[in-house]
Amino acid sequence: MDITARLAEEFRLHPQQVQNTVDLIDDGNTIPFIARYRKEMTGSLDDQLLRELSERLEYLRGLEKRKEEVRSSIESQGKLDESLAQAISSAVTLTEVEDLYRPFKPKRRTRASIAREKGLEPLAQKIFAQEKDSPSPDVLAVPFVGPERGVDTVDDALQGAADIIAEMVSDSATLRKTLRNFLLMHGILKTEGKPGADPVYDMYDSYSEPVSKIASHRVLAIDRGEKEGALKVSLEADLDRCRKTIVRDFVKENTPCSDFVRDAAFDGFSRLIFPSLEREVRNTLTEKAAEQAIRVFGVNLQQLLMQPPVKNAVILGLDPAYRTGCKLAVVGIAGEVLDTAVIYPTPPQNKVGPAKEKCKQLIEKYGVRVIAIGNGTASHESEVFVAGLLREIPQKVSYMVVSEAGASVYSASKLAAEEFPQYDVSLRSAVSIARRLQDPLAELVKIDPKAIGVGQYQHDMPRARLDEALDGVVENCVNTVGVDLNTASFSLLSHVAGISASVAKNIVAWREENGLFSSRSQLQKVHTLGKKAYEQCAGFLRVPESDDFLDNTAVHPESYEAARGLLRLCGCSAEDLKKGRAPSVIQNLDPSRLPQMAEELGVGLPTMQDIAAELSKPGRDPRDELPAPLLRTDILSMEDLKEGMELRGTVRNVIDFGVFVDIGVHQDGLVHISQISNRFIRHPSEAVKVGDIVTVWVLGVDTAKKRISLTMKRPAGKKE
């Protein structure tokens, strides 16, 4: 297989684009680096497409390796003929290769292998030939009966021959492919509830749905129900159609052996083929559902990590609790911890007065502008307390309820202990809650993505595949935003392209020993950070303290000469850079001049365009272009909600069947996919994403079950 040609065809790319990309990957370049700084070679392929191409490249190489292993194994058995070799070479999936290998694959002892040990394979072959002038099977079997073979009767010989024929039919690659496709297209997945099962699975009692139409989230729910012993799951299909296919392919009409072969083949279908294909179909459904869930999780995670930070604001983090009190942490504009405290405004202490006084002191002393409240235990009571507090103070302070998913995991981690050895676990959590609002990306990268709470069935996913996908998302987000080399934590640095965990630790250690970095080039002094790692990471790291203006931009050091040349061609001086006049000059640059400038400066046009874009807005944070977080000053409760009420809320999670929206009542409301848009959408992500600020209307409230139904469709009579 020509893998380059195959990838070019599948991704609809020029072969040279693909070959260049493959060469870059093989040379050890990271995906973010290739996407950002090698656009001329790849034709400006984006990060997502590059990752998909890289994954497909790995699969196709694995496929070719497996083909070679199978060919070698069959050849060593002396059974590789030209047609089989061609079939293996033409196979386009691992499943096809395994189907072809199946008859030659070493098996554990089976009924057929035992029959072969007794010398009954020639009998099976004679019967399977189904010749018109052949004697009947029982006559053919007589010479194969004898105590020396371990075959006592004609019936024993025929049973052994039938077992061999059943396995021969079962091992047919063509038949398995045909029946597999039939089951995928026309199979029915059926479920039955078991007595005493969890009521959450009630909808799947006596439930059935076509395999070809079942939604991914239902597949995962059924899998979990089966795993928990709540459901019995089976695959059903039109078995008569399956048997007709077998007859068509293997049974010759009107011969003395036809009926025998048909019965043996049917036995192979019911005993060997169908159970095997049922497992394969179930596995296929699960794999596709898992990929869909991982894809949704990745999209949600990216949108969560890219939420706009609340910049230049002192934030008071509040970690709610009852008996042990609410933990407070004041975090400065650079993320430093300014103060901590514990208050007891919630039951059973109910010391609301002293709690308000303490908060007022902190707000006045440090100039707190926003209060971040964790959404865990006692969150509602804490929100009521904060809303009351804000009515009593002259300062303009707002609050936001922040998801604290994973905060407890982080707070008890070794990383948190190293970062805040002077604080206990609960105070670390308050710091994390404040920082999540201040800079979601910098704080959330410290936490295992699976604990952040924006996926569905994430604990049922293949761990390695999920980790790989989510790590790619985090890496993409971190490198898109860029990282301040002098303030970034070890966790943040370890997600920068080209920087491993050990190198990230060495960077932090160098910073602690030598003080702040004064230039990007100083990175090369860090232990174990070699030339290749520097090439990969340098463009994604920012050094605000550097005397070189370009060190605080996304311009790669390899393009500094071109960047200075562009400034020179635009008539900008070093003084213009220092005084901030250069960006406006670049912004007014006629784009039609860039091709000529690129040629003159010896760089590709995509690189020149990126340099111009960066110099026009140096240090630009792409998150700033997104809607700001929805901050509140007052509170609602579920009891306040009325049908038809209009509210503003923040999308917290997007899943296959809808979206969950925080409307400020502690319990997120669900907008079912049917209530998201007036136009048809296949998935909620087509219309909305995590972090979006949306207008919703209340459809219904079930206070007993703590369920809120919402719609994003404007009700009739409601004006825009």
Image (cartoon, rainbow, N blue to C red):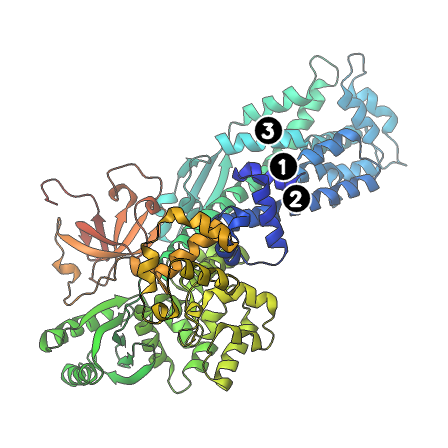
312 sits left or right of 455 in the view: left
Residue at 29% x, 54% y: name it.
660
**Residue 512: % across, % down:** 48, 84
Query: Would you place residue 48 above or below residue 30 in this image?
Result: above
Quarter of the figure with residue 395: bottom left
Q: Would you name the residue on which mark 3 appears?
A: 178
Q: Would you name the residue on which mark 2 appears?
A: 63
Placement of the C terminus among the 4 image quadrants: top left
Whole-angstrom CA distance, mark 1 to mark 2, is 8 Å
Q: Earlier in the sequence, mark 1 or mark 2?
A: 2
Whole-angstrom CA distance, mark 1 to mark 3, is 15 Å
**Residue 561: % across, % down:** 50, 63
For mark 1, does the 10 Å Cα neighbourhood hold few (<14), some (14 to 19), or many (20 or more) residues? some
- Callouts 1 and 2 close, C-beta under 8 Å: yes
Quarter of the figure with residue 706: bottom left
Question: What amino acid type should be assigned to the residue bearing mark 2?
Answer: Leu
233 sits left or right of 114 in the view: left
Q: Earlier in the sequence, mark 3 or mark 2?
A: 2
